[in-house]
């Protein structure tokens, strides 16, 4: 489940770059339509499959509050920051930067359980810093290889990925992954409609545009997020983060060979440093 979600996400990042930079599609509009349609698809699936507990989450005030927080700070925020990072740079760079998230998860868990960082933890943090430096500067500390806006959104996507991974665990254990994901998407889509209404369509739309948007909505959102959350519920946040490390590889390969994104040796080394932290942190389990 985690690996399949990773590949879908990697493909969606590159398709997002294609829509934003070659078809003029607005990032905020895509977030709105992605959340709304994916939420409706999952709601239909849950209703017709008679998924238990699909509606009971609304009977618990504490769960409702947690659901709204997850929708805003988790699922909506992680998609928006990630796609904005892509829009201001490219899918490869944005995806790799997002994979600083597992380092943040490890730091948070160390603080929560009051345990000192191990040697592997320290090495992972050091590699994350080195990798980020190489990725955003290209090895030249006097300049940024990407814009400051892209760097800010990329780092923000790492933070929101950590929130998205950790915050809904108790909700999922109580109500299941499908209700949490379904209502989280719908709430986010409704709220984001006030920022970018779904009827305010922009950009050039041809068959490639429609197919790219359809893949992002159906496979890379409705299905991929459900698979990932279910994987977190089954094997934990850190093991899931380890397995979805296939995402930056998929995004980078597609961006480089399909969209001709320039990716030099320093970027490859930086990407390797960041992704390798996921494997090191898996040793904490």
Image: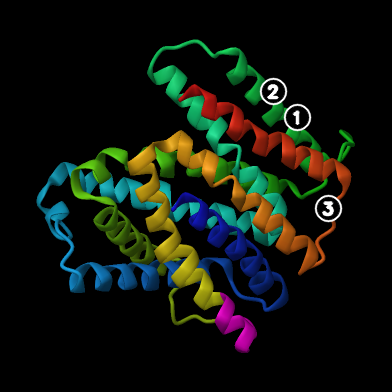
Q: Position of residue 199 (x, y in %)?
A: 44, 82
Query: In what quadrant of the picture does the C terminus appear?
Result: top left
Q: Earlier in the sequence, mark 2 or mark 3?
A: 2
Picture disc at residue 174 = none
Instruction: Name the residue carrying label 1.
Output: 130
Is residue 206 highlighted in magenta?
yes
Residue 262 vs residue 86, the one in the foreground = 262
Picture disc at residue 126 = 2
At horizontal 62% and vertical 67% (from top left) the residue drawn is 16
> In the image as oriented, which residue stretches furthest toward the bottom?
206
Q: Quadrant of residue 89?
A: bottom right
Local SS, label 1: helix
Q: Is residue 24 above or below residue 158?
A: below
The reply to whether dot 1 and dot 3 touch (C-beta < 8 Å) is no
Q: Is residue 43 left or right of residue 102?
A: left
Residue 88 vs residue 116, the one in the foreground = 116
Q: Quadrant of residue 204?
A: bottom right
Q: Is residue 153 above or below residue 46?
A: above
Residue 156 vs residue 175, the one in the foreground = 175
Local SS, label 3: loop
Instruction: Name the residue carrying label 3.
Output: 263
Magenta extent: 202-212
Q: Tell me the CA gap for discs 2 and 3.
A: 22 Å
Q: Tell me the CA gap for discs 1 and 3.
A: 17 Å
The reply to whether dot 2 and dot 1 touch (C-beta < 8 Å) is yes
Question: Dot 1, crowdedness within 10 Å: few (<14), some or many (≥20)?
Answer: some
At horizontal 66% and vertical 39% (from top left) the residue drawn is 275
Local SS, label 2: helix
């Amino acid at each position: 489940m985690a690996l399949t979600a990773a590949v879908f996400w990697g493909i969606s990042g590159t398709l997002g770059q294609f829509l934003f930079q070659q078809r003029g599609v607005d990032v905020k509009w895509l977030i709105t339509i992605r959340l709304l349609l994916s939420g409706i698809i999952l709601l239909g699936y849950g209703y017709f499959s008679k998924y238990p507990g699909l509606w009971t989450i609304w009977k618990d005030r504490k769960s409702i509050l947690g659901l709204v927080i997850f929708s805003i700070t988790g699922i909506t925020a992680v998609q928006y920051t990630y796609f904005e990072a892509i829009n201001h740079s490219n899918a490869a760079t944005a995806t790799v930067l997002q994979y600083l998230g597992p380092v943040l998860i490890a730091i948070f868990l160390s603080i929560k359980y009051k345990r000192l960082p191990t040697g592997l933890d320290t090495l992972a943090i050091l590699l994350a810093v080195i990798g980020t430096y190489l990725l955003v500067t290209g090895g030249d500390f006097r300049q940024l290889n990407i814009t400051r806006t892209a760097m800010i959104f990329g780092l923000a996507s790492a933070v929101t990925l950590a929130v998205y991974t950790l915050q809904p665990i108790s909700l999922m254990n109580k109500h299941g992954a499908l209700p949490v994901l379904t209502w989280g998407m719908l709430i986010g889509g409704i709220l984001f409609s006030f920022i970018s209404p779904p009827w305010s369509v922009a950009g050039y739309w041809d068959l490639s545009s429609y197919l790219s948007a359809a893949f992002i909505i159906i496979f890379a959102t409705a299905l991929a997020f459900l698979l990932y959350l279910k994987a977190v519920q089954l094997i934990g946040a850190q093991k899931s983060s380890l397995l979805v490390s296939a995402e930056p590889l998929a995004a980078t390969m597609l961006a480089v060979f399909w969209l001709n994104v320039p990716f030099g040796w320093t970027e490859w080394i930086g990407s390797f440093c960041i992704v390798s932290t996921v494997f090191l942190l898996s040793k904490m389990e």
